[in-house]
Amino acid sequence: MELPKIYVALDYQNASDADALIEQLPSGKVGLKVGKELFTSAGPQWVSSLVEKGFSIFLDLKFHDIPNTVAKAVTAAAKLGVDVVNVHASGGSRMMKAAADALKETDNPPLLIGVTVLTSMDESDLKELGISKSVNEQVEYLAKLAKSSGLKGVVCSAQEAKMLKAACGNDFKLMTPGIRPEGSSKDDQRRTMTPAEAVTVGVDYMVIGRPITQSPDPAQAVENILASIA
Ligand SMILES: O=C(O)c1cc(=O)[nH]c(=O)n1[C@@H]1O[C@H](COP(=O)(O)O)[C@@H](O)[C@H]1O
């Protein structure tokens, strides 16, 4: 099944605020990303209700725990009917393999992807964590680890897309947050690219939040982005 090119990050405090935004989006053109804040307040039933309405859902809970716990968590996510689910690649190969193996046992397994280096981070953040590799080296290292552990792709910055397609192959899916249309604020993101640039470098799917959700006209913001990548 073809997934939508753009997932709108629903970073809202509760379901009613998210529903108000969803109603404004052009129908059938984008997927929805539900992250920690909204999932914790709105809950799994609300996520299932979006699936029932026909939305493609990326459940972004970035699991990172012992292998058994993560395997059970991604299985629970699969039962909600979401299309994409993620874990932290830095959780290691045993954790990622456990998650990938668990999903093989489920009906309609979601695309399982690994978070490499968060797009809000740069070299100084890695240093603080005791990692002496450059951002590019660390992203490539974790992407290869994700691939050899059975994951189908990674979350990374579009800035790393060319490098990762060369290192991991064209079929290895790249989901890129940190997308900023020309002229919009970077907010807390560090490694950013415009939607048009991201498409050029081979990104498969983009996560876009505030440039759409904080826009005075979210529907128009989506249409402008879609036009820029058409
Ligand atoms: O996994 C993610 O979705 C994610 C990974 C990452 O490296 N960076 C990142 O920003 N995200 C998420 O992508 C969204 C980006 O939102 P905006 O910065 O508002 O476009 C947020 O919901 C983040 O939680």
Image (cartoon, rainbow, N blue to C red):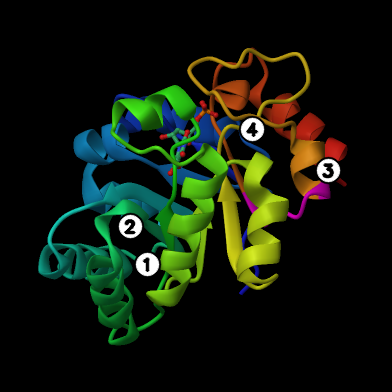
Instruction: Name which quarter of the figure residue 114 lies in.
Output: bottom left
Circle nearer the N terminus (3, 2): 2
Disc 4 residue type?
A: Ile
Binning the other alpha carbons within 10 Å of mark 4 as few (below 14), some (14 to 19) or many (20 upward) gives: many
Mark 3 to mark 2 CA distance (whole Å): 30 Å
**Which of the labelled discs sits on residue 179, or is there none?**
4
Q: Residue at x 20, y 70 (%)?
A: 71
Magenta span main SS: loop
Secondary structure state at the residue bearing disc 3: helix
Position above or below: 17 against 199: above
Secondary element under disc 1, as helix, strand or loop, is loop
State how far apart marks 1 and 3 are (Cα): 28 Å
Q: Which of marks 1 and 4 is in front?
A: 4
Q: Is mark 2 on a helix, strand or loop?
A: helix
Q: Please state which amino acid type lies under the numbered disc 3.
A: Ile
Count of all numbered marks drawn on residues in the image? 4
| Position of residue 173 measured from the top left corner of the image (x, y, whole percent) | 59, 64
User: Which region shows up in magenta?
Assistant: 200-205
